[in-house]
Image (cartoon, coloured by chain):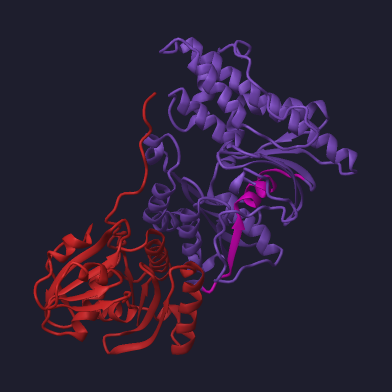
Chain colours: A red, B purple
Amino acid sequence: MILAIDTASRALSIALGDGRGVSYAAHQMRSRGQAENLMPMIARGFRATGCRPDDLTGLAVTVGPGTFTGLRIGLAAARAMRVALNVPLFGMSALEVLAAEAASRFPDRPVLAALDARRDQVYAQMFRRAAPPFAECWSAPMAIAAGDAAQMAVPGTVLIGNGAALVAAHLGGETVVLDGVEPDARHLLRLAAARPLPAYPVPSPGPLYLRAPDAKLPTRR
Amino acid sequence: MSIVLGIETSCDETAAAVVTSDKRILANIVHSQVEAHRPFAGVVPEIAARAHVEKLDGIVARCLDESGIRLGDVDAIAATAGPGLIGGVIVGLTTAKALALATGKPLIAVNHLEAHALTVRMTSDIAFPYLLLLVSGGHCQILLVRGVGDYRRLGSTIDDAVGEAFDKTAKLLDLGFPGGPAVEKMAQGGDPARFALPRPMRGRDHMDFSFSGLKTAVRKAASELEQPPTRHDLADLCAGFQAAVADVLEDRIGRAIDHCRASGTAPTGLVIAGGVAANRMLRARLTETAADRDLPMIAPPIALCTDNGAMVAWAGVERLLAGSTDSLDVGARARWPLDADADPLPFAGVKA
């Protein structure tokens, strides 16, 4: 049994399951209260499935990009559970999880996953179709202007994520826009179950911020 | 005997410890982020939060390893839930919650100030009630500790914390970060009387603090020096600043002792905690202040005065023995006064 967790963007999402399918999933749209609601949500998942923490054979978590505090909540929880349970932890970009969802809904189309990064930017990454359930990376994840992200799209591209509309505003027709979609732990679970989990003890996955912290160096007197 | 794992991430130390109810520290690991913050001459909250999430799980694992205790054998998992820099607190508290959920152990959401307040009970035999002067980069208050969970705030800063005043003075004089040790070192051999610096709040009929005026006075004095200032100038200015701080602390604490006695409470001792308690000159002055009033001055060892996991684990022990645990939906709190009855002070923000 694998536990998948996403708190990286504006949702709180978990899923329990394995390669045969999802046995429990919960998804709340919220950008506040993720830290308060995550553990109770997981506990409900355990109760609903009769699964105990000891039954977990793997963990999966989105590592960002997204809100700095949000992605740290998921990572801190998953990394702590890895220490407690001594099971492998699989870290995946929130953009890849979005791309997996787009790929499952629109086979044979390229995907541009985009999350609103504020300051007139999006976190964006381009993918092309690959053997299910994967979407193959076609670019690195980047924090870029929405107009620049639009340059990556080719005709027929599916735009997905809460930054999809920001990118679509710079494009003509020929695209499918799945706006307002947040990463869904069910897709994270699917990806984790399909890939060989890293053997313990490889280092824990780290955060993917794509942006330096806001801090100004002091000016000399 | 109970065993508690404690986690501290409320400022720029990533820390974990395992402590027993019979006052033994089985492991105590503190990872200081000071190098990451040094270029900024102060703690940058986002840099701190980033470092916590990268380090904490490894520190917890190493801490358990060193203690010889398996996670399954601890009786509770405690973490600082505030007050402090919220991004870091969330990392520590979330880690503790996940450990609690995975093991089925109770969670204890510890107030960072309470952890400082109770540490002395782990390191010394002291009876309630005692007076606590908590002086650090983020806090500056006088508390009457009447029992576990029973605190009365007698005074607090209305602007800067005293450790903040040290840091800002050091930044102003380009002495490096953290400012406390830098100012203390520079003050050695300096003439504290050369610069006439204010003693804010001294003699006032309450027990609050204010340090922003002192900081401004230091800036003004520094700007009037011939540039660049000589080492001699810097030593005199640091010594003057430190003497002003000592005079203020002495005045406020003396008043607090008198106030308690006048209102029928005889404290058993004066306890000092927080990073500023590591300053030898201030320690000596406060020891005298207490002795003048026939009171012992008791401070935990310096390593337990600055932020650490053992103090959080110990507060967890005290809470566990008092039957007080928390549910997994407990929230992190940037502001969390120990004395819920005390009013917030106008410009103190989270520091009161």
Identify the magenta region. B104-126
| In the image, residue B242 lies in the stretch drawn in magenta | no
| Residue at the image position 77 percent from the left and 43 percent from the top | B130
- Most distant residue in the left direction: A155
Taking depth in this image into account, of A96 and A49 the one nearest to the observer is: A96
Question: Can residue B117 be seen in the rendering of this structure?
Answer: yes
* B284 over B253 or under it: above or below: above
- Answer with left or right where residue B343 lies relative to residue B34: right
Q: Where is residue B99 in the image (x, y as percent from the top left)?
A: 48, 67
Looking at the image, how many numbered discs can be counted on the residues?
0
Q: Where is residue A8 in the image (x, y as percent from the top left)?
A: 36, 67
| Residue at the image position 49 percent from the left and 83 percent from the top | A44
| In the image, residue B106 lies in the stretch drawn in magenta | yes
Residue A96 figure quarter? bottom left
Q: Where is residue A198 in the image (x, y as percent from the top left)?
A: 25, 69
- Answer with left or right where residue A38 lies relative to residue B337: left
| Residue at the image position 42 percent from the left and 67 percent from the top | A77
Residue B54 figure quarter? bottom left
* A160 over B313 or under it: above or below: below
| Residue at the image position 15 percent from the left and 77 percent from the top | A175
- Answer with left or right where residue B105 lies relative to residue A123: right
Q: Position of residue A73 (x, y in %)?
A: 42, 64
* A36 over B63 or under it: above or below: below
